[in-house]
Amino acid sequence: MTLLDFIYYFVLPVLSISILLIFIRFLMGPKMVDRIIALDLIITTGIGFISAYSILYNQPTLLDVAMILALIAFLGTVAFTYYIQQKNKP
């Protein structure tokens, strides 16, 4: 089994199942914090999809897209955290 077979037959199905489970958690999350974490995990899993696609089809430029998406996800999480802290202040 080569690396490409491993990515195609194991990594992509695991990422697909995890996206489904995270999306269910996003819909059922009772608090806003749960939804923010689920959204961050969805973006992180999307970065995994982009990276796997980049390896499968030999497109190293997509890794730059994955890095930019990771930066945007980080900044979004920081912004949501700041919003929650400001909302909870008396």
Image (cartoon, rainbow, N blue to C red):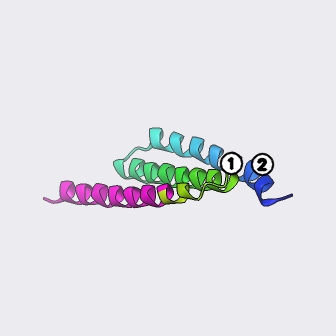
Picture quadrant where residue 59 is located: bottom right
Instruction: List x then y, in percent, for residue 49.
Output: 59, 50
Rendered residue at 68%/48% (across/down): 12
Instruction: List x then y, in percent, for residue 7.
Output: 73, 54
Rendered residue at 40%/61% (across/down): 71
Q: Amino acid at mark 2?
A: Tyr
Residue at the far left: name it: 90
- Secondary structure beneath label 1: helix
Gap between marks 2 and 1 measured at Cα:
7 Å
The residue indicated by pointer 2 is: 9
The verdict on residue 86 being magenta is: yes
Q: Amino acid at mark 1?
A: Leu
Mark 2 packing: few (<14 Cα in 10 Å), some, or many (20+)? Answer: few
- Where, quadrant-wise, is the N terminus in this rendering? bottom right
| Residue nearest the viewer, comparing 78 with 46 | 46
Mark 1 packing: few (<14 Cα in 10 Å), some, or many (20+)? Answer: some
Rendered residue at 40%/56% (across/down): 73
The residue indicated by pointer 1 is: 12
The verdict on residue 10 being magenta is: no
- Where, quadrant-wise, is the C terminus in this rendering? bottom left
| Residue nearest the viewer, comparing 37 with 77 | 77
Residue 3 as seen in the image, left or right of residue 19:
right
Stretch in magenta: 65-90
Instruction: List x then y, in percent, for residue 28.
Output: 46, 39
Picture quadrant where residue 85 is located: bottom left
Q: Main secondary structure of the magenta part?
A: helix
